[in-house]
Image: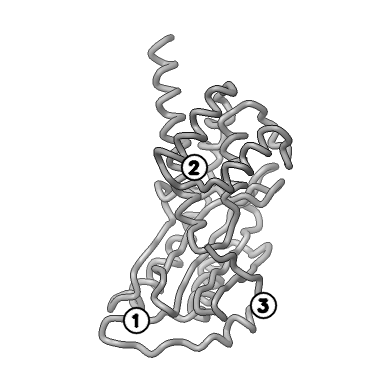
Amino acid sequence: MKEYNLITKDQLLLAEIPKQTATYKPVSHQQLIDLSLEGIHKAGFEVARESYECIRHGQVASGTYLLKGLEDSEMQMQCLWENSYDKSMKLKFIMGAMVLVCTNGMISMRAMGNFTHKHLSDVQEISPLIIPELVKSSGEVFQGLQGERDVLKSIQISKKDQAELVGRMFIEQDFLTSAQLNIIKRELLHPTHDYRAPQTMWELYQFTTYSIGGFNSTWIADHVKAHDFFMAEAELITEAEEVMY
């Protein structure tokens, strides 16, 4: 699980684009940059910051764009893409939020605004049509993530609850490593950041995404698994409380 390296746009574009074959259709990093920036502009947003990461000399890369004007005191909307020239991953275009105090991600595949596709015959035609349309949904996606954050912040959990949830993510859901467990334990004892919601599911969610980190070969999938796990648990807790009252 190699961590990505920060790179400039010009450096990223030096990566050699592979030849097209009957079964593999490359989408260039340049095209994804252009589609993202054009989509953001046409949707009426501005880029607050853009950054690029890669491994294997640009054979696997990602671009991230923070959107100006779509933020509150805790989070800011971002869109990002992941792409590969070595057939190691699907093309992904993801809408999510960045938690400002720690730069943790909040990514939900249940939300509108997410696209993943293998590099097959139609990917070159689909991508230019879908990506700009997805960017238009940024406002609605951000509102949805704000609502989910507020639900998680409203649910108080005990140390026993924390232990059970962390154990299930490690053993039952199998998306946390032993190293990440140690990070979560450390955060529970001595938090690196103040998420202003102590002893809540939101705080544990942040400890979890902090342990996962960002920009490696599995980070998007692991963030999505964590988000889906926490929201499913929150729904069960909310439904049980409604039955009680």
CA gap, disc 1 and disc 2:
34 Å
Give the crowd class for mark 2: few <14, some 14-19, many >=20 residues within 10 Å.
some
Q: Looking at numbered disc 2 in the image, what kind of residue is underneath it?
A: Gly
Give the crowd class for mark 1: few <14, some 14-19, many >=20 residues within 10 Å.
some
CA gap, disc 3 and disc 1:
25 Å
Residue 8: give its label: 3
CA gap, disc 2 and disc 3:
32 Å
On screen, 138 above or below 166? Answer: below
The answer to whether residue 49 is left or right of residue 92 is right
Q: Secondary structure at mark 2?
A: helix
Which circle, 2 or 3, is nearer the viewer?
Answer: 3
Q: Residue at x 43, y 42 (%)?
A: 228
Q: Residue furthest front?
A: 178
Q: Residue at x 32, y 81 (%)?
A: 24
Q: Earlier in the sequence, mark 2 or mark 3?
A: 3
On screen, 112 above or below 160? Answer: below
Q: Residue furthest left?
A: 22
Q: Looking at numbered disc 3 in the image, what kind of residue is underneath it?
A: Thr
Which residue in the structure is indicated by mark 1?
Answer: 25
On screen, 212 above or below 200? Answer: below
Q: Secondary structure at mark 3?
A: loop
Q: Looking at numbered disc 1 in the image, what kind of residue is underneath it?
A: Lys
Does the CB distance between marks 3 and 1 fall below 8 Å? no
Q: Residue at x 39, y 68 (%)?
A: 90
Which residue in the structure is indicated by mark 2?
Answer: 144
Q: Which percent across, then down, holds residue 148?
A: 51, 37
Q: Nearer the viewer, residue 218 or 113?
A: 218
Does the CB distance between marks 2 and 3 fall below 8 Å? no
Q: Which percent across, then down, holds residue 2?
A: 56, 66
Q: Which percent across, then down, holds residue 176?
A: 50, 46
Locate residue 13: give its quadrant. bottom right
Q: Which percent across, then down, holds residue 88?
A: 41, 72
